[in-house]
Amino acid sequence: MPRPPSINPGPDSAQLFWAGSALFAAVVLIGLASRAAEMAGQYGWVMGLPPSERAAFLRDLRKALGMATHGESEAFEATLARWRATAESYSDPDVAKAFTGPYPTRHKEVSRPGAVAHSLR
């Protein structure tokens, strides 16, 4: 019975291994890039958030995804809806200024409720 050829782990085998690994990585990256492009179209509004808000969005999204894995998918949908509305608000400079401040200080100083009750005695 003929003996099967042995694989000699020489430089040619190593080069073939790394070439195959690089090809696999390229295929995976191409797949990720097309998925990222698809997601950018669907969730492109995230880029309308300021960087600090994007970080908060990702924290909330991670939490909502965790809840969704336990059957609470409405938390995920609600999180996306709230953050999309926030991104839309940031896209309008007047609205963004209204909710990010600075706020006018035309208000009167109010004393604590306990202080008023004591002063009426």
Image (spheres, rainbow, N blue to C red):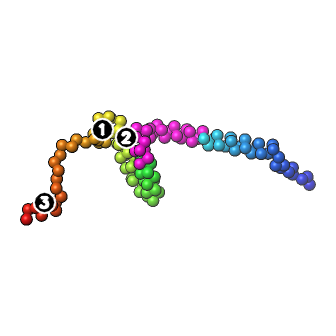
Q: Is residue 63 left or right of residue 35?
A: left
User: Could one spot residue 105 in this view of the protein?
Assistant: yes
Residue indicated by mark 1: 97
Report the side of 35 relative to 63 (left or right).
Answer: right
* Amino acid found under the numbered disc labelled 1: Lys
Please name whichever residue, 13 or 41, is drawn nearer the observer in this view of the structure: 13
Q: Earlier in the sequence, mark 3 or mark 1?
A: 1
Q: Which residues are magenta?
A: 30-56
Residue at the image position 45 percent from the left and 52 percent from the top: 62
Q: Earlier in the sequence, mark 2 or mark 1?
A: 2
Q: CA distance from mark 3 to mark 2?
A: 42 Å
Outermost residue to the top: 93
Q: Nearer the viewer, mark 2 or mark 1?
A: 1
The quadrant in which residue 116 appears is: bottom left
| Amino acid tagged 2 | Ala
Quadrant assignment, res 106: top left
> Which residue bears the numbered disc 2?
87
Dot label at residue 116: 3
* Residue 70 in which image quadrant: bottom left
Mark 3 against mark 2, which lies toward the viewer?
A: 3
Which is the main secondary structure of the residues drawn in magenta?
Answer: helix
Task: Answer above or below: position of 19 versus 114.
Answer: above
- Mark closest to the chain's N terminus, 3 or 2: 2
At 41% across and 57% down in the image, what residue appears?
72
Measuring from the top left, give residue 36's x and y in whole percent. 52, 40
